[in-house]
Amino acid sequence: MKTMMFSLRTTKEIIRDPISMLFGLLFPVIIILLLTFINQNVPNDLFNLTNLTPGIAVFGLSFMSLFSAQIIAKDRASEFLTRLFTTPMTSFDFIMGYTLPLIPMSLFQAVICYSVSIMLGMPFTVELIFSILLLLPVAILFIAIGLLCGSLFNEKAVGGICGALLTNVTAWLSGAWFSLELVGGWFERIAYILPFVHAVDMGRAVIHGDYSNLFPHIWWVIGYGIGLTILAIYIFQKKMKSS
């Protein structure tokens, strides 16, 4: 009950900033539209929607890190969170309260991306639904990154880290709109150490019905998501004790 009440309050805080929310939801759609129009004017099927959409959906979820980081950083800077530290709520309650409202928002964003792609000509299949559901652990991964950054840095810092830095890292090291094999070398090796390209690869595997290639990508995403969530809870707990 405590977590749900805090989750409801977090939802209200997100709604109070509709411009950022709309930007996070619509920016991936703009990219899909732009790259699709480019694809219509090049001789090769460079930005095939079936390959492009899972990548853009993962890129779009990087904005969830910014939202979660900003909320927790704002609360840390105000007396609101300090007062809540005197309640029986645990660090787990706080982290779940910040996380839960962003999960349906993440899935809604994914549905918008895929819906736009369907309207642009991508065939609707059962695998498409599975591909959307697989974005749930990806969403948790990005939310955990935001919660960790929000627990460590102030609001101005998280704007740069989870805004400019993380979105660019996700865009370039996930292979969202180009194959990392084209670059190869150390760039590709670094990318596959991080979870972002694994999130894209598992989405593409499922949407093509190639379930055998779902592994080991999903374990990378789940492993990073669980690890970062546990770390965020630990750091937040340390901050609670020091306040």
Image (cartoon, grey):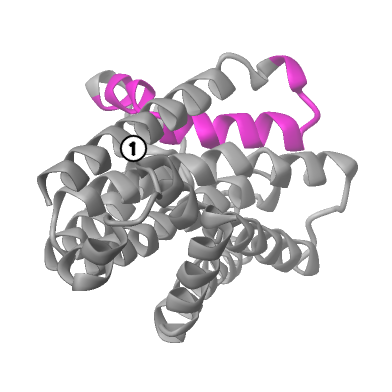
In this figure, which residue is indicated by the disc labeled 1? 233
Tell me, yes or no, whether the highlighted magenta stretch contains residue 200: yes
Residue 64 or residue 44, whichever sits in front: 64
**Residue 208, percent across and down?**
76, 33
Label 1 packing within 10 angstroms: few (<14), some (14-19), many (20+): many
Q: Above or below — where is 163 with respect to 58?
A: below
SS class of the residue under badge 1?
Answer: helix
Lateral position of residue 70 relative to residue 22, left or right: left
Q: Above or below — where is 75 with respect to 103?
A: below
Q: Is residue 45 visible?
A: no
Q: Quadrant of the N terminus?
A: bottom right
Q: Is residue 207 visible?
A: yes
Residue 96 or residue 213, whichever sits in front: 96
Tell me which residue sits at (75%, 65%) in the image.
Answer: 115
**Magenta stretch bounds:** 187-212
Tell me which residue sits at (68%, 66%) in the image.
Answer: 112
**Residue 91, percent across and down?**
35, 43
**Residue 196, percent across and down?**
43, 36
Tell me which residue sits at (33%, 37%) in the image.
Answer: 233
Q: Amino acid at mark 1?
A: Ile
**Residue 11, percent across and down?**
52, 71
Tell me which residue sits at (52%, 54%) in the image.
Answer: 3
